Image: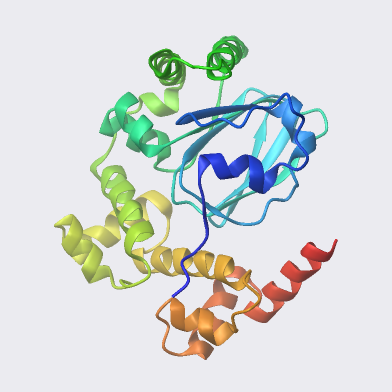
């Protein structure tokens, strides 16, 4: 069985930046930083849907960008910051010609060293765009400038990199009312549920399985998920599966039926109906649109 393609931090440059200047070193550090103004001209937009094996931040200081995160199209404007969790299906859809700011990529291991579990949940539970004050945005720009200098040294000091990144996180938490709200039990359950679905969606599509993993009842899980994301657990499981199917459909050597079977849908016609219900188009129409994008 072919696994869904995942993109690592070191893949990012090769996959989505073409003909990079020799000034841009290939970074091998667990934390990576790209200046949007300098690199946006090299990024082929829109990027194909992919499932990154890293977390990342998009900090916009001027202009705007649009990022697909799972099924949502998110707009990021001046003095705003978006956090995207490892495991999300994502695509950079648009970058305005005047866009400035930074993209910071970091692995899960790094994140776990820098944030408590509660901070982690608050930051990534809703993939929210956080609006920053001009003062905070300017402060972060200065900090990311220092981080960029350290990262691009021939032998970067990872301790310094982590300390700078942690300072950035603390500044964001201190200046955001949204992130300073007390965390509800529902938010914690939802975060853990989403993490489990990204891990097990291929073989486990029942609410019972996830309720068991979380040691809660099916009814309680349903209430928590509905309260926090406005969808039922089953709707979310199906949505994740269909988003993953879009990645598989990009492999033109597979038939639609083969994609359905790989995702453990025994009936390809049911898979087709579910795909259309969630995306608004059929798998065939999605594949046709993808092929047109490739030819442009």
Q: Position of residue 276 (x, y in %)?
A: 59, 77
Q: Quadrant of residue 235?
A: bottom left
* Residue at x-position 68% and y-position 51%: 47
Give the camera-side residue of 128 and 219: 128
Give the camera-side residue of 7 and 40: 7
Give the camera-side residue of 99 and 9: 9
Q: How is the image coloured?
A: rainbow
* Residue at x-position 43% and y-position 23%: 177
Q: Position of residue 54 (x, y in %)?
A: 46, 42
* Residue at x-position 50% and y-position 45%: 8
Q: Farthest left residue?
A: 215
Q: Is residue 295 above or below residue 84?
A: below
Q: Is residue 39 above or below residue 273?
A: above
Quadrant showing the N terminus = bottom left
Q: Farthest front residue?
A: 154
Quadrant showing the C terminus = bottom right
Q: Position of residue 4 (x, y in %)?
A: 49, 64
* Residue at x-position 42% and y-position 56%: 230
Q: Is residue 285 above or below residue 51?
A: below
Q: Quadrant of residue 253?
A: bottom right
Give the camera-side residue of 208 and 39: 39
Q: Position of residue 199 (x, y in %)?
A: 34, 58
């Amino acid at each position: 069985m072919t696994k869904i393609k995942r993109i690592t931090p070191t893949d990012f440059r090769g996959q989505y930046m073409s003909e990079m200047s020799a000034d841009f070193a290939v970074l091998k550090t667990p934390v990576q930083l790209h200046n949007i103004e300098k690199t946006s001209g090299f990024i082929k937009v829109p990027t194909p849907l992919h499932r990154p094996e890293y977390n990342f931040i998009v900090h916009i200081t001027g202009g705007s960008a649009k990022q697909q995160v799972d099924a949502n199209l998110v707009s990021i404007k001046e003095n705003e910051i978006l956090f995207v969790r490892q495991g999300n299906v994502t695509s950079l859809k648009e970058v305005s010609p005047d866009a400035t700011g930074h993209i910071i990529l970091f692995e899960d291991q790094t994140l776990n060293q820098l944030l408590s579990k509660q901070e982690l949940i608050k930051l990534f539970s809703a993939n929210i765009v956080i609006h920053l004050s001009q003062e905070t945005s300017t402060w972060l720009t200065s900090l990311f400038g220092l981080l960029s200098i350290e990262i691009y040294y021939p032998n970067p000091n990872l301790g310094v990199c982590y300390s700078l990144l942690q300072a950035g996180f603390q500044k964001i938490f201190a200046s955001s009312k949204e992130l300073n709200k007390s965390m509800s039990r529902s938010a914690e359950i939802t975060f853990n549920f989403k993490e489990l679905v990204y891990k097990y969606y291929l073989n486990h599509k029942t609410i019972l399985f996830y309720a068991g993993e979380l040691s809660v009842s099916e009814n309680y899980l349903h209430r928590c998920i509905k309260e926090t994301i406005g969808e039922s657990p089953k709707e979310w499981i199906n949505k994740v599966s269909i988003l993953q199917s879009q990645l598989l459909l990009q492999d033109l050597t597979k038939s639609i039926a083969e994609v359905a079977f790989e995702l453990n849908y025994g009936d390809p016609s049911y898979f087709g109906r579910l795909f259309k219900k969630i995306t608004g188009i059929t798998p065939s129409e999605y594949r046709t649109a993808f092929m047109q994008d490739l030819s442009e």
